[in-house]
Amino acid sequence: MKIITVEVREDHLETLAQTKPMAALAELIWNALDAEATDVRIEFIENDLSGLEMIRICDNGHGLHYEDALLVFRNLGGSWKREGSRTHEHKRVLHGKFGKGRFRAFSLGNSVCWNSVYQDGEEKSSFKLKGQAEKLGEFTVFDRKGRVDEPSGMIVEIQDVRESSDLLRGVKAREEVTNIFALYLRQYPGTQIVYDGIPLDPGNAEKHFVSYSLGTLVTEDGLRIEATLDVVEWHLAGKRSILLCDENGFMRIQAQPRLYFRGFSYSAYLKSAHIATLDSEGLLETGEMHPDIRQLLDAVRLKLREHFALREAETARDVLDYWKDTGLYPYTGEAADPKEENERRIFDIYSTHLERIFTDFSGASLRTKRLVLRLMQELVHSDPVRVAGILDELITFPEEMEEQILELTGAQEPDIDKTKSE
């Protein structure tokens, strides 16, 4: 048995050990993926009173060699990952390079134990390493065992769990962890992460995916930076997030505030090497107070507005085609004159918007939809401008759509509430 003492200031370790729960857990998952694990399982072990007793992270990666442990746990930043940007065997892009993840584990619990099984020549060996939050920077390494009949991998067990770790469970936590690893699982589909008994499957949860180049941005300091934006739309409602990532899509921080596009659930991944630079300098936490972050987020917001305007138009076309195919569309044949043509355009705008954002309507039976669409047709025919007022009492109707209606009808602006939220 050996005692390892970390050669770094204690206050720096305390800062690392105060990471938010999900960020700390994500670091441990990244460590498993960087060890070329194809199966990572996060388990929450309860006691007899249904309280959280232990968090366990199991993987089938290469494990950590005994000799390497003596080095990397002694020096913060002494990670083998700094030697290259990809894993040795599968050539995956590496996430971590500075070895901070092992210290952030103490933000989840006061006692952390690493159990490693690794290939040692022709045989497998294992060893155990433990640390306590009350003695940050001091680790106990237990003697190596040879000729182990177990598969390679690492099991991290966190005990004396902190109350804040309860935030790691439930639907919202699973959505958050899916956000973090969605791009990685898309890039490496042979990798599985099972979270609290449920496999993360962003592929099935995805509704639409598109990647944009934001081009070259010039900062206030004259630095030229490249950035791309990946937008994932989800089937599950209520997800809205902008995540700042390095150029490989590894999330560094989630941006605030998030943009709201009615009827769309999405995650937007801003990818740039400059994000990693700002992170290494400790500037990401300043948010939009930093001019570079503000400039990047402004570019993201502009692209997202363009994206969802296009997606709304695409969705409207799909809905109208479906209605026409099933006989729900109340108009038949070609428009008789320009007046009816305008009337149809107004009807299309109102009805498809209603379908997209009003779940009571979109989920209704065909008979109910046919009745509502027929009534809406009559209302649009008699007084198209007042439709905006009626819908505004039920749902938040976009101001730009109301303006489009006014242009089609040539009417004056109706006296309705113009306060909208994005």
Image (cartoon, helix red, strand yellow):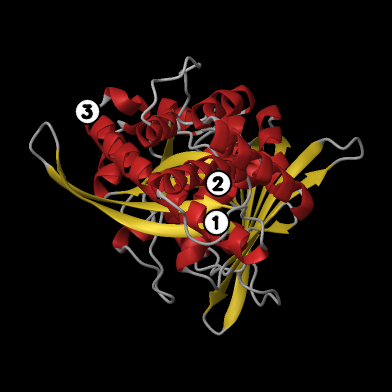
Q: Which amino acid does label 1 sit on?
A: Leu
Q: What residue type is labelled 3?
A: Pro
How far is mark 3 from mark 1, CA to CA? 44 Å
Mark 2 surroundings: few (<14), some (14-19) or many (≥20) residues within 10 A: many
Callout 1–callout 2 Cβ contact below 8 Å: yes
Quarter assignment of residue 393:
top right
The x and y percentages for residue 187 are 45, 67
Q: Name the residue under label 2.
A: 352
Observer-side mark, 2 or 3, equals 2
Mark 1 surroundings: few (<14), some (14-19) or many (≥20) residues within 10 A: some
Q: Which of 359 and 126 is in front in this view?
A: 359
Vertical side of 141 occupied by 107: above or below: above
Q: Is residue 5 at least partly visible in the picture?
A: no
Mark 3 surroundings: few (<14), some (14-19) or many (≥20) residues within 10 A: some
Residue at screen point 48% across, 34% down: 260
- Please give the label number shown on residue 162: none
Q: Is residue 62 at least partly visible in the picture?
A: yes
Quarter assignment of residue 191:
bottom right
How far is mark 2 from mark 3, CA to CA? 39 Å
Q: Is mark 3 on a helix, strand or loop?
A: helix
Q: Mark 1 points at which residue?
A: 320
The x and y percentages for residue 295 are 23, 34
Q: What element carries label 2?
A: helix
Q: Is mark 1 on a helix, strand or loop?
A: helix
